[in-house]
Amino acid sequence: MNLAYRDIRHSLGRFLLTCVGLGLLLGVVLAMIGIYRGLVVDALTIARAPAIDLWVVEANTRGPFAEASRIPGDTREAIARIAGVEAAGSLTYQTVEAEHLGRKLRLYVIGHEPARPGGPPGLLDGRGIGQSHFELVADHASGLSVGDRIALGRGTFSVVGRTVNQFNSGGDPAVYMTLADAQKLQFDLSPSASRVQRARGAVPNGRDTVNAVVARLQPHASPDAVAETVRRWKHLAAITQEAQENILSQSLVDRARRQIGLFTSLLLVVSAVIIALIIYTMTMEKLKQIATLKLIGAPDRTIIAMIVQQALALGFIGYFTGALLIMNIKDYFPRRVILEPDNVLALGAVVFAVCLLSSGLGVRAALRVDPATALGG
């Protein structure tokens, strides 16, 4: 006879309702873990998209993501001539806001040269950019569809293709356009501002400026050796792909990582306290039954097993309820939620440990019950 099962069946509705409430709490914990993983993946996505080995940026900066970086566009030609470099391309990055069908869109605009490294890694539908001006490829999360037209700056662009899962560290969907269009969008002054500058005698800067030059190396080339060659030019800095990913994951999202980690830890502590209180309350409600079991000779291990089994059932039913809920609604979050199997299993192990520890309070109360209380009125 399983005492835990019989006790749960006696008050099944209340027990399941408690499991659902705990499941919502554990679902929030799982969502926070997924949001953190999504934050890190989003931060690395744009940096990994070009599939390159080296980033060349402005001297004394860690750009183009962590800091502002501006270098001459013809730097690409100098980088392409370095021994070991297979291909090089110029890139610009900027965040813009635009209106489309009556709603505001916040987009991360990437300017690239279509025949060189830096373009979208793959297409969901449509085609790549085929003209030198006024075409773009948008991420599907932007809500733009192939054939749509959208005004950016002083130009109107046609969406010719869509890519997938291309976000910056802030969660803004990416759009790709030609380098010339992106430079015009980023560096051109408005007509009124340009007239003011000319009236002041200022000479407007040329538009042949980029935020970074990326290089894909030959198989035998060492990224560190090529980077050291670039650093000899005093006006440039070189960052390997590995170093760029470290900057993004450890510096750019570090504060968010620590905050989410602290919040997740607090939720786990709250879950442990709730499980402990629930098990303790369930134990206190049946002290007389436990005393009766002791009076008829039931060993302590039987009583301990009943309480531990109830705690584990409560924890794991709640855990699977929360996991099922988050798995079904994660695509509706405004930020990407990524749940890896190792994260889900790790949380399951934590829930198991929490249930065992939390059952200790109920076990302690049960073992202190005097069998004589079963004879009371």
Image (cartoon, helix red, strand yellow):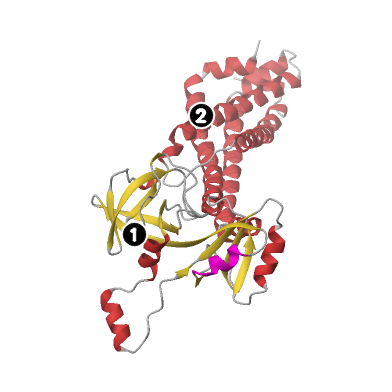
Q: Is residue 185 above or below residue 321?
A: below
In space, the residues marked 1 and 2 are separated at their CA atoms by 39 Å
Q: Position of residue 112 (x, y in %)?
A: 45, 58
Q: Is residue 3 visible?
A: yes
Q: Which quarter of the rendering shows the N terminus?
A: top right
Q: Is residue 21 visible?
A: no
Q: Residue at x 36, y 86 (%)?
A: 202
Q: Which quarter of the rendering shows the C terminus?
A: top right
Amino acid type of the residue tagged 1 in the rendering: Glu
Residue 258 placement: quadrant: bottom right
Residue 306 placement: quadrant: top right
Q: Nearer the viewer, mark 1 or mark 2?
A: 1
- The residue tagged 1 is 97
Residues in magenta, as a range? 73-81
Residue 250 placement: quadrant: bottom right
- The residue tagged 2 is 321
Q: Badge 2: few (under 14), some or many (20 or more) residues near its Cα, within 10 Å?
A: some
Amino acid type of the residue tagged 2 in the rendering: Thr
Main SS class of the magenta portion in the image = helix
Q: Residue at x 72, y 12 (%)?
A: 296
